[in-house]
Image (cartoon, rainbow, N blue to C red):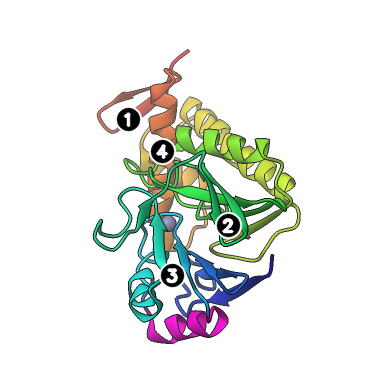
Amino acid sequence: MKIETILAPNPGPFTLDGTRTYVLDGTAVIDPGPDIASHVEAILAAAPNLRTILITHRHADHSPAAVPLKQRCHARIFAPANTLADEVVDRRIHGGEHLDLSGIPLEVIATPGHTNEHVCFLSADGDLFTGDTILGSGTTAIFPPDGDMGDYLLSLQLLRSKSPRRIFPAHGPTRDDAVALIDEYIAHRLDREAQIVAALRGRAATIPELRRTIYPELDPRLEWAAEVQLLAHLIKLVGEGRVGREGEEYKTVS
Ligand SMILES: [Zn+2]
């Protein structure tokens, strides 16, 4: 399978250098990205016989270009629940399905966590298209209540169980060390969780206190996002009965 990468011109703190749209054998596209005219033209140039548009999740840096692409070449849109309007989606896809796109077999893997509807796609060669579940560098953001840290860790373990060979993320470079990268992602979240528990056993009780302890020199633009990540971990810890909450204050249960 020939995989071509088209980088969208939407760089930012969460999109890294932009959304990576993948064109498979010139006939299928994964995560068409934002509706930016030059990006849509670049996809059409790389995929003159585009038949299928696949989407990992509903976010605006992944799904909107599906609509102008479909208008231009009548490709079918395959998307999970809550992604684009029902009128434009040709088929809702679910974890466990095996798609055959004109000779390209792809397994759909449900990976809730970043968002509830998120899916990844695995090729027969072990190429895993991870959307925002795994990025090529850095970590992904989990925003509750749609994002769920407990689900996210289970999704990472499910992806690891598939023993992928390469990872094609929606942001950041392709990675040849797929299983090692997934292990790093799991370890990073468990380390963060351990830091939170240790900070709560120390002087921190509120989310801003945890943020100052755990992310002491953070870019101020990312402070709110860091606090939401902490909240995502705390929701998991409270759900597991390991941390208790009273108003704005959290403490470990022991
Ligand atoms: Zn996203």
Judge whether residue 82 can be spotted in this image.
Answer: yes
Q: Position of residue 72 (x, y in %)?
A: 37, 81
Q: Which mark is residue 135?
A: 2
Residue sitting at 59 percent across and 35 percent down?
158
Q: Quadrant of residue 220?
A: bottom left
Residue that badge 3 annotates = 33
Does label 4 point to a residue whose CB lies under 8 Å from ligand 1?
no
Q: Position of residue 229 (x, y in %)?
A: 43, 45
Q: Amino acid at mark 1?
A: Glu
Q: Which mark is residue 249?
A: 1
Residue 70 drawn in magenta: no
User: Mark 3 or mark 4: which comes first in sequence?
Assistant: 3
- Find ligand 1 in the image and state its quadrant: bottom left
Measured in 3D between alpha carbons, the distance from the residue under mark 2 to the one under mark 4, in whole angstroms, is 17 Å
Residue that badge 4 annotates = 148
Measured in 3D between alpha carbons, the distance from the residue under mark 4 to the one under mark 1, in whole angstroms, is 20 Å
Q: Amino acid at mark 2?
A: Leu
- The secondary structure type at the circle numbered 3 is loop
**Nearest the eye: 164 or 9:** 164
Tag 3 near tag 1, CB within 8 Å: no
| Type of secondary structure dominating the magenta stretch | helix
Measured in 3D between alpha carbons, the distance from the residue under mark 3 to the one under mark 2, in whole angstroms, is 15 Å
Measured in 3D between alpha carbons, the distance from the residue under mark 3 to the one under mark 4, in whole angstroms, is 23 Å
Tell me which segment is drawn in magenta: 36-48
- Left or right: residue 133 versus residue 223 is right
Would you place residue 63 above or below residue 247 in this image? below
Residue sitting at 32 percent across and 25 percent down?
245
Tag 3 near tag 4, CB within 8 Å: no
Residue 42 drawn in magenta: yes
User: Mark 3 or mark 2: which comes first in sequence?
Assistant: 3
